[in-house]
Image (cartoon, helix red, strand yellow):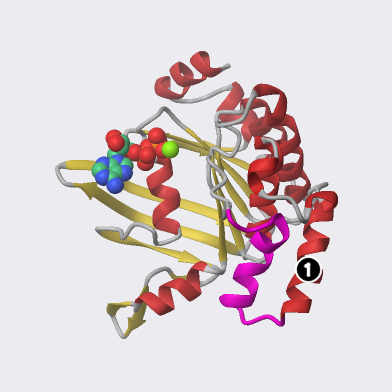
Amino acid sequence: MSSTAGQVSMVEVRSVHKSFGPLEVLRGIDLDVRAGEVAVVLGPSGSGKSTLLRTINHLEKVDSGWISVDGTLVGYRRSGDKLYELREREVLKQRTRIGFVFQNFRLFPHLTVLENLVEAPVSALKRPREQAVAAARGLLDRVGLADKADAYPKQLSGGQQQRVAIARALALEPALLLFDEPTSALDPELVGEVLDVIKDLAASGTTMIVVTHEIGFAREVADTVVFMDEGRVVEQGPPAEVLDSPRHERTRAFLSKVL
Ligand code: ADP
Ligand code: MG
């Protein structure tokens, strides 16, 4: 557990509904993640976990309800009691405050590892290049890949690529990091090195929401475990409660399958 977890809300999700056509994927989600906390989201395939992460980053618009990150409404501006949609440019600016790590890494294949980390700080944050390069080298060192700065993504293992993707997300100095099954695409022997990097971040007080099926990781690192099923948060609480004495039958059934 991270010792820096405070009382300040970093993420607030209130009554969020989201449908794709006739399919209601999020059916009234409420979620709070405090600054410095690690929330681990568990749930069966199709329960809406990825969609929830995507709404937090405004990659999907909500149908109703609202989300705020670091005290700022995501995708909207409030004026009196009315909400106005932000323009694309403002949404992109908001998004730089939120890092997203995908299952399949999504590195830029035509750029070196170093350039993968330098691109966004220079283009989106207008950082001087030398400063971005120095920061990128520091981040590569932090994820144990200082010697791979000049390699291209395809020359790396999956575990190394995902560590680069995490470093790339950190290069924007985000207030919040979202992980969507960061180890699901990896060979089993490469899972540990990626989880270790995420554990380091947790210990340093980075606020994170991690969707994963790694129960051991959840037990060790999560401040709060969120179990989702069919577009709802079925239960949320400390790992010892949700994982060892779940209150709901659906949580029990899920855990008995993945443990
Ligand atoms: P999870 O990540 O928990 O597996 P998802 O959030 O990816 O669940 O998906 C929840 C449901 O929403 C699934 O039935 C999925 O097929 C559907 N879905 C997700 N994204 C879209 C989309 N862009 N268009 C239509 N259906 C979608
Ligand atoms: Mg998913």
Across the whole image, how many numbered discs are drawn on residues?
1
The one of 182 and 159 positioned closer to us in this rendering: 159
Q: Which residues are magenta?
A: 110-128
Q: Under tag 1, what secondary structure?
A: helix
Can residue 120 be seen here?
yes
Query: Which percent across, then down, holds residue 158?
Result: 65, 36
Dividing the picture into quadrants, the one containing residue 44 is top left
User: Is 225 on the left-hand or right-hand side of 223?
Assistant: left
Q: Are there few (<14), some (14-19), or many (20+) residues within 10 Å of tag 1?
A: some
Q: Which residue corresponds to mark 1?
A: 135
Residue most extreme to the left: 22
x and y percentages locating residue 24 in the rendered image: 23, 42
Nearest the viewer among 7 and 205 is 205
Where on the image, by quarter, is ligand 2? top left
Q: 9 above or below 234? A: below
Magenta residue check for 120: yes
Residue for point 32% across, 33% down: 230
Using the image as rendered, state which of residue 4 and residue 128 is in the foreground: 128
Q: Is residue 233 visible?
A: no
* Residue found 66% across the figure and 22% down from its top: 188
Compared to residue 92, the image places residue 250 above or below, namely: above
Percent x, y of residue 127: 68, 80
The C terminus sits in image quarter: top right
In which quadrant is the N terminus drawn? top right
Identify residue type, mark 1: Ala
**Residue 183 counted in the magenta span:** no
